[in-house]
């Protein structure tokens, strides 16, 4: 995966969330965006995924602009948020089928085959006909991951997918995410689960107050140079 960011700035009202960020990263599999709450991690992920646009600057992921070539880019990605965002009136199965059958126009037989395989992979086959209110938070988040995977994306964005879960459910979801790496997908991940992320990601960006303080591969976390990252790693 290749990521190039040229002088992006993001402002909400009068508050600058991301301040003139530039990056040039090549040949990575999984990017971990780390930092304290409010540093701009989720905002950066939303810009990288094309959900929001910067006030200034340019973003290219694998030489494609999430903004200029939005439709092409969106067809290649999946996004999982802190909240599962499943439709409450639909079963787990139909939450996924809605995308495949109604939007992607995949026939019912192929839709059924794909959904059953995903539910089996994420260990929620028994929840297929249940609505979100009838399953646990961990199961709902795994259903959300299944929905994101249903279009066979090459890149998955994960924005604090375990933040609303208890420790046991968190481990369930992290185990499910780890199982996806063998499929050869790439990931951009925002999380405070540092023990997990240290093994999962192979490149890291550390943000503080909307700026990139440090970046590097796994060695960065064992040998931070800035006082800010040293302090962050003591806490997390």
Image (tube, rainbow, N blue to C red):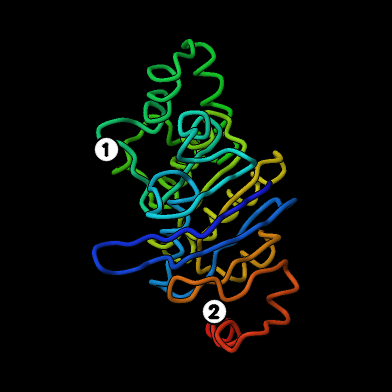
Residue at 49 percent across and 60 percent down: it is 170
Side of 44 where 155 appears, left or right: right
Coordinates of residue 231 in the picture (x, y in percent): 55, 88
Side of 77 where 47 appears, left or right: left
- Of badges 1 and 2, the one in the foreground is 2
Q: Nearer the viewer, residue 18 or 84?
A: 18
Q: Residues within 10 Å of mark 2 (few under 14, many from 20)?
A: few
Q: Nearer the viewer, residue 170 or 56?
A: 56
The answer to which of marks 1 and 2 sits earlier in the sequence is 1
- In the rendered picture of this protein, how many numbered marks are placed on residues? 2
Q: Residues within 10 Å of mark 1 (few under 14, many from 20)?
A: few
Disc 2 is placed on an element classified as: loop
Query: Where 132 sits versus 165, above or below?
Result: above
Disc 1 is placed on an element classified as: loop
Side of 196 where 219 appears, left or right: right
Q: Which residue is mark 1?
A: 88
Q: Nearer the viewer, residue 79 or 14?
A: 14
Residue at 28 percent across and 61 percent down: it is 12
Q: Quadrant of residue 204?
A: bottom right
Residue at 71 percent across and 60 percent down: it is 202
- Residue 236 is marked as 2
Coordinates of residue 179 in the picture (x, y in percent): 65, 47
Side of 99 where 3 appears, left or right: right
Coordinates of residue 155 in the picture (x, y in percent): 59, 41
Q: CA distance from mark 1 to mark 2?
A: 34 Å
Query: Where 144 sits versus 224, above or below?
Result: above
Coordinates of residue 103 in the picture (x, y in percent): 40, 20
Residue at 54 percent across and 60 percent down: it is 171
- Mark 1 touching mark 2, by CB under 8 A? no
Quadrant of the drawing holding the C terminus: bottom right
Query: Where 163 sits versus 180, above or below?
Result: below
Q: Quadrant of residue 97?
A: top left
């Amino acid at each position: 995966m290749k990521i190039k960011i040229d002088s992006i700035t993001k402002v909400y009202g009068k508050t600058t969330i991301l301040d003139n960020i530039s990056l040039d990263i090549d040949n990575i599999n999984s990017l971990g965006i780390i930092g304290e709450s409010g540093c701009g991690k989720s905002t950066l992920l939303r810009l990288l995924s094309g959900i929001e646009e910067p006030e200034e600057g340019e973003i290219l992921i694998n030489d494609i602009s999430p903004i200029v070539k939005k439709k092409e880019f969106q067809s290649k990605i999946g996004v999982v948020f802190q909240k599962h965002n499943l439709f409450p009136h639909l079963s787990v199965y139909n939450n996924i089928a809605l995308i495949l059958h109604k939007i992607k126009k995949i026939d019912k037989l192929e839709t059924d085959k794909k959904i059953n395989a995903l539910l089996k992979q994420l260990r929620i086959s028994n929840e297929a006909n249940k609505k979100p209110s009838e399953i646990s938070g961990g199961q709902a988040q795994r259903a959300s991951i299944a929905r994101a995977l249903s279009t066979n994306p090459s890149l998955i964005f994960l924005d604090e997918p375990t933040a609303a879960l208890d420790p046991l459910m968190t481990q369930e979801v992290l185990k499910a995410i780890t199982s996806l790496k063998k499929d050869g997908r790439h990931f951009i991940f925002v999380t405070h689960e540092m023990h997990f992320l240290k093994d999962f990601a192979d490149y890291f960006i550390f943000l503080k107050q909307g700026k990139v303080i440090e970046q590097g591969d796994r060695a960065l976390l064992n040998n931070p140079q800035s006082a800010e990252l040293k302090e962050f790693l003591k806490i997390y």
